[in-house]
Amino acid sequence: MPAFALPSVATSRMPFRTAARCSAMPSGNFATPGGPARLQRDLALSSSVTNINDEIERIISENELVLFMKGTSFQPRCGFSRMTLGILESIAGDRVKCVDVLDTVRNPGLREAIKSYSSWPTIPQLYLDAEFIGGCDIVQQLASSGQLQEMIEVALAQ
């Protein structure tokens, strides 16, 4: 056997993954933990959107804690979005509302519009009480200092 060849591994020792298990998340199969409750936290633009900035304003004004992120609360599609969501969930639980900027069917044009709206070049973006807070780095700094928890507690108590 050449020095660079890898030994054969028995397939019975490989992690079990089936197509059904992998496709369960996007298809809406709610047999997975946190299924329906978690997906109810994911918001989308109204189907009758004429001005996307008005729709962004509507979403952030109707919800105390909104995270514009890549992916859904059930399946974040970016490490920064996952990290930010994890911090927010540890403080506010399921009160975090998420908007998937990558979903071009439900949220067409949102990915670029939210960057323009906030004048912030990256995603995720956190809004608390209709005020832009920042992205992952800002959320991490605020969380480590304890300020984020205070801000969220005040916002959610109102």
Image (cartoon, rainbow, N blue to C red):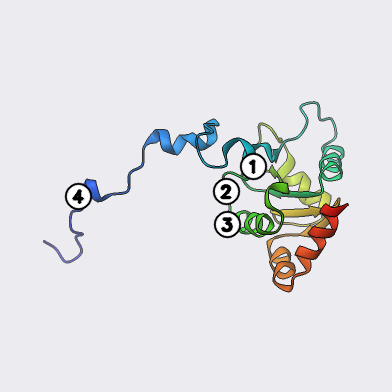
Label 4 vs label 2, nearer the camera: 4
Residue 133: x, y in percent? 80, 59
**Residue farthest front in this picture:** 157
- Location of the N terminus by quadrant is bottom left
The residue labelled by disc 1 is: 102
Q: Nearer the viewer, residue 66 or 95?
A: 95
The residue labelled by disc 2 is: 77
Q: Are there few (<14), some (14-19), or many (20+) residues within 10 Å of tag 4?
A: few
Label 1 vs label 4, nearer the camera: 4
The residue labelled by disc 3 is: 79
The residues tagged by marks 4 and 2 sit, at their Cα atoms, a distance apart of 31 Å
The residue labelled by disc 4 is: 10
Q: State the residue at coordinates (87%, 44%).
A: 61
**Residue farthest top in this picture:** 48
Q: Nearer the viewer, residue 26 or 158?
A: 158
With respect to residue 3, does 99 lie above or below? Answer: above
The residues tagged by marks 2 and 1 sit, at their Cα atoms, a distance apart of 9 Å
Label 3 vs label 1, nearer the camera: 3
Label 4 vs label 3, nearer the camera: 4
Residue 118: x, y in percent? 82, 53
Secondary element at tag 2: loop
